[in-house]
Image: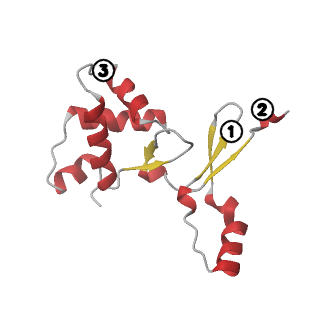
Amino acid sequence: MAGTWQEELRAKGYRVTPQRQLVLEAVTSLEHGTPEEICTAVQRTAQGVNISTVYRTLELLEELSLVKHAHLGHGPPTYHLAVEAEHVHLVCRGCGAVSDVTPTVADGLVEALRGEYGFETDVHHLTVYGVCENCHG
């Protein structure tokens, strides 16, 4: 992979456009943003960018392994930087807070699934629902 996302785009024959830069900046700042939230953030700088442009840009950035998506509920996917994708999501059913934890917290589950069922777990797409410390007390 090239050194920067701009180099990666150019190496694959794509131009570095302001819209692509704004979408990537929004993904970075939001950490777990839906396409609609990303669009809102982009429109603060470039009002003419519409949701379809954001969806196309996210699709391209994901194809280039610059961003990844996760499903954190019944709504739309959320996007985060691919370099920060090495985590398990904890989602609070009380307040909706999303926390990222190291995949090693699931080691026991991963080993049990492998040993008992021969199942290889993709913990990078693992989302655990429950109640956070602030809501359960």
Q: Which residue is mark 3?
A: 45
Q: Residues within 10 Å of mark 3 (few under 14, many from 20)?
A: few
Q: Amino acid at mark 1?
A: Cys
Residue at 63% from the left image edge and 42% from the top image edge: 99
Residue at 59% from the left image edge and 56% from the top image edge: 126
Q: Which residue is mark 1?
A: 92
Q: Amino acid at mark 3?
A: Thr
- Residue contact between numbered discs 1 and 2, judged by CB atoms under 8 Å: yes
- Is residue 54 shown left or right of residue 70? left
Q: Which mark is residue 119?
A: none
User: Mark 1 or mark 2: which comes first in sequence?
Assistant: 1
Front residue of 55 and 82: 55
> Element type at marker 3?
loop
User: Mark 3 or mark 2: which comes first in sequence?
Assistant: 3
Q: Which residue is mark 2?
A: 135
Q: Position of residue 20 (x, y in %)?
A: 26, 38
> Element type at marker 2?
helix
